[in-house]
Image: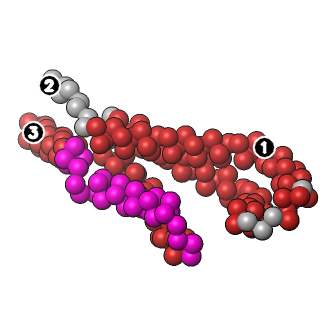
Amino acid sequence: MEEEKIVRPPSYIVLMLYKLAAGLTELTIGISFGIFGKQFVTIYNAFQLSHVREDTSLYVRTIEKAIPFLLDHRTYVIVFFLTFGLGKIIGVIGLWFEKLWAIHLMIILSALLLPFEFADFLQRPNIFLLFYIIANISIVVYLVRFNPHIQHIRHKHHLRKLAEKEKKNNDASKT
């Protein structure tokens, strides 16, 4: 049986590049937080004692609330970033080789955080969160339904399963 040449549409490649960049970023953050976690505490304490503390801008108030939470829950943050980063990288590798499990993994990883992102958007609406939510919803919808390349992968997987089943039936009938 001759292997057919894989032709990946540009939208599929863009999706893989986006997920690869996100996975590498999350993996880097997780590793950095694991290696340099104690230094982050020192840096934050120095930052907190500096004159910036008197600044009442939204950025400083956000940092003052977020950083202590992240530092107190450092282990969970590390596990979160490492898990999602590795999951996305593995999913991209699977998408490159057109594995059906990779499509399901990417759908799960993209959809898993949507409720939290939506709740965050309702609490603090801004244009960046809106675009991020729209991008993730678009990825999920793209993977689930509307991409012909994804449909081709599913069809190819289905045909492979039918061929295996037919071969098994033929082997059983010969014995």
Q: Nearer the viewer, residue 46 or 41?
A: 46
Q: Mark 2 packing: few (<14 Cα in 10 Å), some, or many (20+)?
A: few
Q: Secondary structure at mark 2?
A: loop
Rendered location of residue 45, percent (x, y): 88, 56
Q: Which residue is located at x 65 percent, y 45 percent?
A: 29
Mark found first going from the N terminus, 1 or 3: 1
Badge 2 amino acid: Met
Instruction: Choose top left, top right, bottom left or bottom right for residue 130.
Output: bottom left
Residue segment shown in magenta = 123-151
- Marks 2/3 in contact by CB < 8 Å: the verdict is no
- Tell which tag, 2 or 1, sits nearer the viewer: 1
Quadrant housing the C terminus: top left
Q: Determine if residue 116 is in view.
A: no
Q: Give the residue at mark 2.
A: 1
Q: CA distance from mark 1 to mark 3?
A: 60 Å
Mark found first going from the N terminus, 2 or 3: 2
